[in-house]
Amino acid sequence: MKPYIILNAAMTLDGKIATKTGSSEISGKEDLIRVHKLRKKMDAIMVGINTILADDPRLTVHKIKAEPQDNPVRIVVDSSARTPLYFRILNDDAPTIIATTENADPEKVRELEKKATVLKCGEGRVNLKLLMKELSSNGIKSLMLEGGSTLNYSMLENNLVDEIRVCVAPMIAGGSNAKTLVDGDGIDQMSDAFKLKFKKSYCLGEDLILEYKVI
C-alpha cells in the first residue's frame, strides 16, 4: 500500500526548475494559487533535504484562504538527519515527519524527535518504498511531491509516482549545471524512459499547465 502521489513542479521551457545559482522563482501568481489549492486537498507534501537547505520552505497553505487544519503533513526525505532545528519546516504550523535512516547520527535524530516525528526507513539511504508503506499505514492517502530533481528521479525509478502536473513558464534559463525537473542517474536507452499518458493542458496567466498519468 502507498499514498496516491502527484509530482508537481514548475519549470522553464528548457526544463529547468532552478538556475545554476539556485534561483527558482518560476511560477506566476495564478500558478502559485493553483499549487496551494492542491496542497489544501492533499494529506501530505514531501520534499528532499536539498530543497529544505536551499529554500527553507514552510510547505503550508498560505497563498489562499486556509485554516491551520488545512495544512498537509510535511515530509522531508533526509537520510543523514541534516534538517536544521531552526528551519521553518519544524515550526508549529503543521505536523512534520523526517524520514531518515538507521545510519543517521543518533544525537541529531534525538534533537529532531523533539520537534517532529522521525521515521527510520533503510540504512544508507531512505528506502522510499518502505517510507510510502509507513506513511500509508499512518493514514496518509494522498501525497504531493514537490521534490528536487534527485528525489523526483528516485520516486519515478521506484514506480511510486501516479501523476505529474507541471507548470511550464515562458522563459529559458539554460546552464549545464542548472537543475532540471528530473536528474538522478537517468536511463541509458530512450525506450526505457518513464512512460506518461496525457490528461489535459490549459493556460494559467502566462503559464502552461500540463497534466499526465504515469503509466
Image: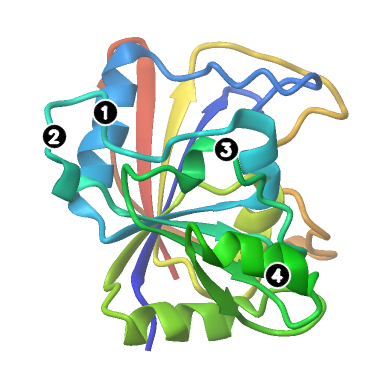
Residue located at (54% from left, 16% from top): 25
When asked about the image quadrant of residue 208, the answer is top left
Relative side of 80 to 56, left or right? right
Label 4 crowd bin: few (<14), some (14–19), many (20+), radius 10 Å: few
**Is residue 55 shown above or below 128?**
above
When asked about the image quadrant of residue 136, the answer is bottom left
Relative side of 124 to 51, left or right? right
The amino acid pointed to by label 4 is: Asp
Which residue has dot 2 on it?
Answer: 66
Quarter holding the C terminus?
A: bottom left
Of mark 4 and mark 1, the one earlier in the sequence is 1
Which residue has dot 1 on it?
Answer: 62
Of mark 2 and mark 3, the one earlier in the sequence is 2
Which sits in the foreground, 149 or 48?
A: 48
Cβ atoms under marks 2 and 3 closer than 8 Å = no
The numbered disc on residue 87 is: 3
Asked which secondary structure carries label 3, the reply is loop
The numbered disc on residue 192 is: 4
Which sits in the foreground, 123 or 13?
A: 123
Q: Nearer the viewer, mark 4 or mark 2?
A: 2
Cβ atoms under marks 1 and 2 closer than 8 Å = yes
Label 2 crowd bin: few (<14), some (14–19), many (20+), radius 10 Å: some
Q: Nearer the viewer, mark 1 or mark 3?
A: 3
Asked which secondary structure carries label 1, the reply is loop
Asked which secondary structure carries label 4, the reply is helix
